[in-house]
Amino acid sequence: MAEKLQQLTIHDKLLRLASNLWWSWDPDVTDIFRSLDPEVWDRTNHNPIELLREYPADRLETRAREAVLHSRIHWGYRRFREYLESSTTWGSTHAAILGPGPVAYFSAEFGLHESLPIYSGGLGVLAGDHLKSASDLGLPVVGVGLFYAEGYFSQSIDAEGWQRESYPPLPLQSLPLQVVCDGDEPILIQVETRTGAIHARILHLAVGRIDLYLLDTNIPQNKDEDRLLTGRLYGGDQRTRIRQELLLGVGGVRALNALGILPNVIHMNEGHSAFAPLEVIRQRMQSDALGFERALRDTAARCVFTTHTPVPAGHDRFDQGLIDENLGPLADALGLNTHGIMGLGRVDPQNGGESFCMTVLALKMCRIANGVSNLHGVVSREMWAGLWPWRSVEEIPIGHITNGVHVPTWLAAQMRVVYDRVLPERWYMRTGEPQVWNSFESITPGELWEVHFALKNRLIAYARRQAADQARGRGEDESVVAAMENMFDPKALTIGFARRFAPYKRAELILKDLNFLEKLINDIDRPVQFIFAGKAHPADERGKQILQQIFQLARQPQFRGRVLILENYNIDMGRHLVQGVDVWLNNPR
């Protein structure tokens, strides 16, 4: 490998590093890109592909020499190659029982990095962290999703506190995505509907050792309306939504087949991909001459489902007309009439007035279902008890697996240095082993506080810059901008709330008693300050109103300088908040 490494130029090595998201959770390589040009790094939203486009190869060589980066680049690239080529992973020892094919992880969104905004919230961040963790562990996983040409919206907040949305395009040439081809021709898949076929090409994204495939309908083979189908995450009307989900589920399975990938397990991250098992059933019926019920049982034994939404209104439902228009050809192939296909998405298949629910379909199509926390498991069992009327609520077959995180993504580099000093080698790969933490107590409280306080100061500096930029963007007076640049006290207890502004997440709960809040915030001996961040769905008027309430609260004299709402929440902002706040605020019922 040494000879091959020496043949590559600095530009070659950096481009290969930039083309695989492994760099995003390796602090040393991330710092290399930042050190090349901090101003461009920030301006490009930490996108190394964009950064390298601004540096021709000869200029890059000069800049790397000026910044004394040559040896770091060579070492970073060597570690990257060793990571990819290692055959001794946790998965190589423990994951053989998964069978010959990989786990196909289907998700409508993947939150991998702020430079690739094809995510909206926790569901996507969980999906992204799953892929990164699978890569580190060496698990046989392949991701399946959609590429949204305009991603999720960019948020601004106007002078009245009202959310405004814009949709800047995501040019492929600025992203680490490759069109998957057979020779020189893109590999295409199609999904039939009553109104014609939807065509899609396949884009590939390398996430460490993991392959993520994203379907893109913006190709000449489609009608104009279908070219826009993968334009925006959670955009459009109900017809757009069902066609996106048809493409994700049915098209995703067909894309894997076109690539020669035969998954052993289908994992549906939320109900958006619940049509995937139906396509697997169709293929089993065709290839093995099975009846529908037998093929369903065999397929369900290979499917698992994670549900996220704790409120009934958050689960996708479609009327019979949309189901017939878009699932008609698939239903025909399954030997199901309209009543039969609708029944798969109904709690009561005989209830003609019940709409088709994607979560119901997913629950009927899987062997194992789970919520994302202990409490959410309880809520989900109660919500879907009607599917098993002969069982008590406690016996409903929906368990829970509490959401975890990919530690290298979220742990600050400064804190990792402390952990690395006292914990066993590669401790971050063994966080579930109690003995790994035996030596943690050797870290003194003073040492932990010193690092935390530095991260808190970094957060406050970041929040001040963001707040001042927002104020300028709204055309605020320079005195307001100046106040933003000096707000917050590093010594005050700093509480963070960063989530989607969905009503059930109750961001406005602290507004219930403003007198108490005022006393809390302005306590002379123990002051408190709040940083909020999050987006409301463009169609969620109530969510936007809650966001506006927080914004207007922050402008009241008694709360000014102690409450802030940051606009355009993303993964980078999330990292600053997670690493810098003293307390994380959550408001479950």
Image (cartoon, rainbow, N blue to C red):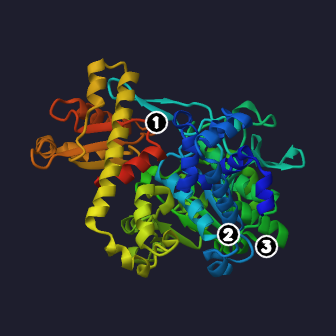
Marks 2,1: beta carbons within 8 A: no
Upstream in sequence: badge 2 or badge 1: 2
The residue sitting at 26% across, 31% down in the picture is 552
Locate the N terminus by quadrant.
bottom right
Q: Position of residue 318 (x, y in %)?
A: 57, 48
Q: CA distance from mark 2 to mark 3?
A: 28 Å
**Amino acid on which disc 3 is placed:** Leu
Q: Which amino acid, by three-letter code, is at mark 2?
A: Pro
Q: Residue at the spot x=24%, y=47% of the render?
A: 509
Q: Quadrant of the C terminus?
A: bottom left
Q: Where 422 sits versus 276, above or below? A: below
**Residue 32, image x, y percentages:** 58, 47
Measured Cα–Cα span from mark 1 to mark 3: 44 Å
- 82 sits to left or right of 437: right
- Residue at 61% of width from left, 56% of height from top? 22
- Viewer-nearest residue: 54 or 189: 54
Q: Is residue 67 visible?
A: yes
Pointer 2 residue: 140
The answer to whether 198 is drawn above or below residue 340 in the figure is above
| Labels 2, 3: front one | 2
Where 394 sits versus 455, above or below? below
- Residue occupied by mark 3: 290
* Kind of residue indicated by mark 1: Ala
Q: Secondary structure at mark 3?
A: loop
The residue sitting at the right extreme is 183
